[in-house]
Amino acid sequence: MRLLTPAILLIAALALAACNNPRGGGEDADAWGGDDAIGSTALGDPNDPDSIAHFNEMIGDRVFFTVDQTDLSDEARETLRDQASWLNRNPQFAILVEGHADERGTREYNVALGARRANSVQEYLVEQGVEDSRIRTVSYGKERPVEACAEQRCWDLNRRAVTVVSR
Amino acid sequence: MTALTARPPFRALILALAALFVAPAIALAQDDGPLRIEITEGVIEPVPYAIPDFVPENSNGRQYAASIARVVAGNLSGTGLLREIPADAHIGRITSFDSPVQFSDWRAINAEALVTGAVAVNGDNITVKFRLFDVVSGQQLGDGLQLDGGADNWRRMAHRVSDAVYTRLTGEGGYFDSRVVFIAESGPREERRKQVAIMDQDGENVRFITDGSALAFAPRFSPTGDRILFTSYETGFPRIYLMDVATREREMIGDQPGTMTFAPRFSPDGQSVVYSLSVAGETNLYLLDLESGQRTQLTDNAAIDTAPSFSPDGRSLVFESDREGTSQLYILSVETGEAERISFGQGRYSTPVWSPRGDLIAFTKSHGGRFHIGVMRTDGSNERLLTASFLDEGPTWAPNGRVIMFTREQAGGDPALYSVDITGRNLRRVPTPGAASDPSWSPLLP
């Protein structure tokens, strides 16, 4: 099932993480519904053009990068233009752009690289008219591969930025 | 090795390891003078030694008599500089700590060094004594030493004995009575659980100090070993946490809305933290004064500046930056803010760490699809690669600046901790309860 993408699972994980924050509060926790809420958003029917399922599966929630790079390919731009029109059509959704790196780099460099990739996507979405204040970015570096294998094909899938939408 | 050449004449048992920056030393054996293991380049044959079970000096001491000797032997043999002659080959017996040693019994089995000890337990307290002998010359090396403390600290006492023996034989500072903070990993890679944990340097006494509910990485000990820094996704975003090791109390520091903060390291005086802050895709270095909360931006450019490490005098930082394209190492003067590139070899350089001695910088290098741990002088000269594998990264220095621990990951495998000495010899896996990464060595314990 493509429906339960790791990105969606991550939303849940992030919401839980916010709730587990013993000090609570803080801008991060607020962004995810405060201390005692677990964010929950219906994915809907992928054939409904305004559903999250449609965004994730039909438009594509992610774009890919080449080694050490943050430039957007033509294909990535096309995906992001489609993402932007969905996001502009559905202004009630909050947007988190996650930047990721493959495992072929050191940990902290990869966090910074993922931040740069997420920013690259954020800037492009803003160029396409998405309101800046709706978008937050986070980098997971190489900590959350979508495919774990010591091969090029996995590294290619892991060098990505994922646009996660939620209400 | 200036530290060595300054010592008095000796019968040198010239051993492995490498003298840096000097031509390979020639092993000279003089027949007078005490046993001396010289840590120099080019070696070779570990020095044979014997360490019989310590002598129990009361009935409660019996339970520790063998185990203390085993911990000491594990440390000494683990250096690669010494080779233990097993007990079943011993001819001599040590039945009293203070009786004269029959050196002929130990010479007969070709032991060159002999460690003897005694242990007594009274209530909750333990007393450990030891002596070190040069078997060949029939002399004691240094004075006997007595250690007293709580019985639950018996391993630390064994490490103290190990440090004393190591120092007397090599002239180098010890490193056994120390700990390592690291990340214990479990679960599938896509959803990896990563907890901060602390263990003794030999892998014993593992304690988890975060619960694993939030992803955490790259912990660092404070210069006095009483606090740690690490990065955690507890809020959903990378943030820096400062934790008191004894109380486990912690606080988030350096956070700034709309940014990501990570890669924290203490200054040598423990009063400041240098770290990376990412905003709008740019990652720069900042310095936070822990007392006042005052924040100073140290670098300001569109590049990735991260993995900072202070020089022991606190006046400079070495860090990695891709400001000129690929990641390279730079040294920043804290006073002037000027950064100077020091790495010029092929490949990408990252995670530089300044040696506690101040003389070397250890780093990760990737080149041609392989990853290496290497060392260079602080001006970038004399680069030497110590390891090579699918993925080696994140070196940390032992308190004496002679041994480096790092993370190694084989293709498709789980990460594990390894140690290697600064000559590239004696590569060893450090035992951990499961997958492990991101080691950071503490100073010697007080």
Image (cartoon, rainbow, N blue to C red):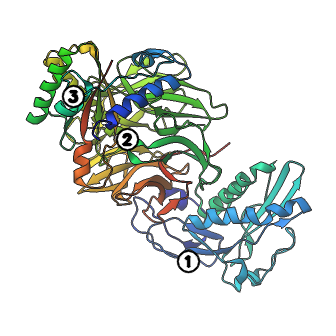
The image shows residue B64, relative to residue B278, as above or below, that is below
Viewer-proximal residue among B344 and B218? B218
The residue singled out by tag 2 in the image is A143
- Callout 3: chain: A
Q: Position of residue A154 (x, y in %)?
A: 26, 50
Identify which amino acid the numbered label 2 is placed on: Glu
Establish if A133 lies above or below B400: above
Between B196 and B177, the residue placed more toward the observer is B196
Between the C-alphas of marks 3 and 2, the distance is 27 Å
Image coordinates for residue B376, horizontal then vertical, percent: 36, 51
The label shown at residue B387 is: none
Crowding at dot 3, Cα within 10 Å, few <14 / some 14-19 / many 20+, comes out as: many
Which mark, by number, is residue A54? 3
A119 in relation to B153, above or below? above
Which disc number belongs to residue B29?
1
Q: Nearer the viewer, residue B307 or A78?
A: A78
Q: Amino acid at mark 3?
A: His
Q: Nearer the viewer, mark 1 or mark 3?
A: 3
Q: Mark 2 vs mark 1: give the one in front.
A: 2
Quick one: which residue is furthest to the bottom in this view? Answer: B108
Report the chain holding disc 1: B
Q: Earlier in the sequence, mark 3 or mark 2?
A: 3
- Residue A159 percent across, percent down from the top left: 24, 41
- Residue B117 seen in the current view: no
Q: Secondary structure at mark 1?
A: loop
Within-10-Å neighbours for mark 2: few <14, some 14–19, many 20+:
many
